Amino acid sequence: MTLPHSLGGAGEPRPPQAMEVHRLEHRQEEEQKEERQHSLRMGSSVRRRTFRSRWEPQGPRPATALEAQLRCQTSAVELEERGQKRVGFGNDWERTEIAFLQTHRLLRQRRDWKLLRQRTEEKVQEAKELRELCSGRGPWFWIPLRSHAVWEHTTVLLTCTVQASPPPQVTWYKNDTRIDPRLFPAGKYRITNNYGLLSLEIRRCTIEDSATYTVRVKNAYGQASSFAKVLVRTYLGKDAGFDSEIFKRSMFGPSVEFTSVLKPVFAREKEPFSLSCLFSEDVLDAESIQWFRDGRLLRSSRRRKILYADRQASLKVSCTYKEDEGLYMVRVPSPFGPREQSTYVLVRDAEAENPGAPGSPLNVRCLDVNRDCLILTWAPPSDTRGNPITAYSIERCQGESGEWIPCHEAPGGTCRCPIQGLVEGQSYRFRVRAISRAGSSVPSKASELVVMGDHDAARRKTEIPFDLGNKITISTDAFEDTVTIPSPPTNVHASEIREAYVVLAWEEPSPRGRAPLTYSLEKSVIGSGTWEAISSESPVKSPRFAVLDLEKKKSYVFRVRAMNQYGLSDPSEPSEPIALRGPPATLPPPAQVQAFRDTQTSVSLTWDPVKDPELLGYYIYSRKVGTSEWQTVNNKPIQGTRFTVPGLRTGKEYEFCVRSVSEAGVGESSAATEPIRVKQALATPSAPYGFALLNCGKNEMVIGWKPPKRRGGGKILGYFLDQHDSEELDWHAVNQQPIPTRVCKVSDLHEGHFYEFRARAANWAGVGELSAPSSLFECKEWTMPQPGERPPVRRTGIRGAGHIPGAAVGTPTVYGGWACHRLSRQFPGGRL
């Protein structure tokens, strides 16, 4: 029952809590009253239905105190149970209401975020459009092009700054002819556009590069152009305009020439080799000496050292691999252009661990690197030592641990294999061994270090430019919901089909959620109507997977499911029917293999190319006439269709053949060439010597010289003569066509000047070495008195000299008397 309220508070307003307590007490009193009335009604009805015997007295029996007490206790228990049920119901209702409010708040927060993101993108787009509309204008040059005067063989850079909105289209011209870098040698022109900074780089300028260069820019609001002149100056005396010799020595140092010749090197796998050359002068900057292999610049590394000391440049390799085979070239700068020498380095197979085992593979590369898989390729060895390759063993090394573990074995008919089960974020290297009936080869050179990762993450990023060059990078993952069951993947197809495996590829689901994805694959044989799960040793994290357990002559379809921590997607659409291919076929041999004698120890080979996209190169084999065993010439596939075979023995006859190389292996041998005997080939002649002045006039001289000591195995066809005035710095050519004799009349000289001469001899092999300069001869007319009548000059007086230009046979000439006596003293025996 409720307590009476105090009288003192009758006129005051009650607080809300007191009113709530009063209501609850009033409700409890009403419920208790209803319970008592109900119990009384039930008690009276029970009494009315109670059976009484005939011996019991009639009339109502008064209720005892015990019954009343029990009735009160029962009512209290029932009332307590009802209260507990009411409280439990209230608690459940409260929890439901709290969960509802939380869900409502989360949904409203997501809606607000989406709306805010949408408004942000709309504002950015509106600002971009407004900026383009407000700033749209035709191009104009803030900084125009500037003319340049540069030296020959140097690099010139033309730059200018243009402002325009939208960005204009840029075109460069040379004397009104458009410059297309693809039509010129690689690296000649380099055109860049870096946010309005336009540049044209011209490398190794020549006289032909002197021209007017124009840049034209154009957009929707107009066009503009700027031009500049480029003057290329030569280092040769008069054309240079000043003492170019001083400039050359201050810029490039003294002229450097080679004093030794690079010779072919025959190295062996796993062993060191070195190349070295000597220079005539000290090289001021040792770093300017460059070494190349097959046109690729080499740099010092842990296995390769580039050294220079005491006018000697050297390249040393501590451990040789087949990949080190190739054409090596050394280049050193010089005032008149770089000096170069080249030679070929051939790498022979290392000694086999097992007798008769094949050579090691080479060119191991990692392709299509993903989170947990990649494709490994290599080139087959050139020499199997008579035992065909049955398989390839693949080993892997994690990081720089140095521990090599076998991880896969590929069949011998292919040089391509998928590697799976790798760990994302880890780095790996791989190497391959060739296996035959005789045993395993030595391991190949390890591949480059690769890091497993998601290489498709860059495609999920978008760059939004704003504020004149700034960018905002947004990833599509940021727009994904946190709690999302992924959608099914799409575009399931075979990216690669081979004899032993099929590489499946698909596109990631959209939406995919922020949680990491894994994939499960299923296969079905065409016509079976059932799907079978494809098992894998580790979860598939990349949208690539190689299926290895397929049966030949059966067609399959595949489907993929995506899953994350929130659930599994529905299966994707089935792929197109896929079946394994037959064994790959080797490429046909090249045709028209021809051999030509090159030098006394080498032979040049040419052949027609094999046009196939899977071609890796060619292997060349040789044998002596009379023997049946073919020897490997090169252990690294040749890319071109011409090769010079060094290291042959003079006087021996050889035959050659060529084979094509692909991932399927080494193809059939071409037809053997005709036997060719190695003998001394035609070479250019050595330099002439012994220059003499035979006659001299006011402005002309007659010069004679002795023939070269080495004719190069052929007839001398003529000579080229140069002259040099001691008061000038440059040499000038006297004749443009070869002179068949060893006497030349030089005209248009200056009286009183001193001149020196030099010459070259030419034969069918080309123009030979340049001779050393002669002594200085003064251009002064000879005034020796002529005693009596001059005898006629006979053609037999100078054997082999031929008719002297400007003099008739049998008539008096200026070449008689004392001049003939001087000529006979210079050339004893009357022979020139």
Image (cartoon, grey):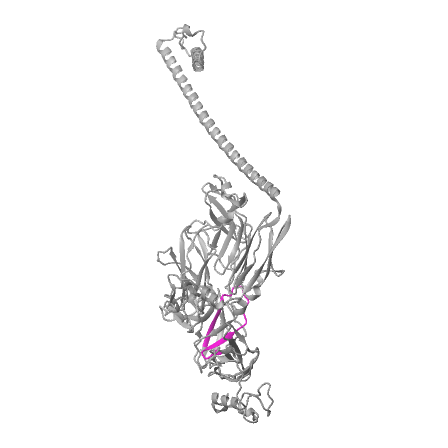
Examine the structure image and report whether residue 528 is included in the region drawn in magenta.
Answer: no
Examine the structure image and report whether residue 604 is included in the region drawn in magenta.
Answer: yes
For the point 35% across and 58% down, the residue is: 402
Q: In the drawing, does residue 438 fall left or right of residue 639?
A: left
Total number of numbered discs in the rendering:
0
Front residue of this view, candidates 252 and 648: 252
Does residue 546 appear in this view? yes
Please identify the quarter of the rendering in which residue 411 is found: bottom left
Front residue of this view, candidates 720 and 62: 720
- 71 versus 326 height, above or below: above
Does residue 42 appear in this view? no
Q: In the drawing, does residue 122 fall left or right of residue 99?
A: right
Q: Position of residue 781 (x, y in %)?
A: 54, 83
Residue range (magenta): 598-622
Q: Position of residue 76 (x, y in %)?
A: 39, 15
- 812 versus 449 height, above or below: below
In the rendered image, the quadrant that contains the N terminus is top left
Front residue of this view, candidates 254 and 113: 254
Q: Position of residue 503 (x, y in %)?
A: 49, 55
- 145 versus 817 height, above or below: above
Please identify the quarter of the rendering in which residue 81 is found: top left
Front residue of this view, candidates 679 and 695: 695
Q: Position of residue 84 (x, y in %)?
A: 41, 21
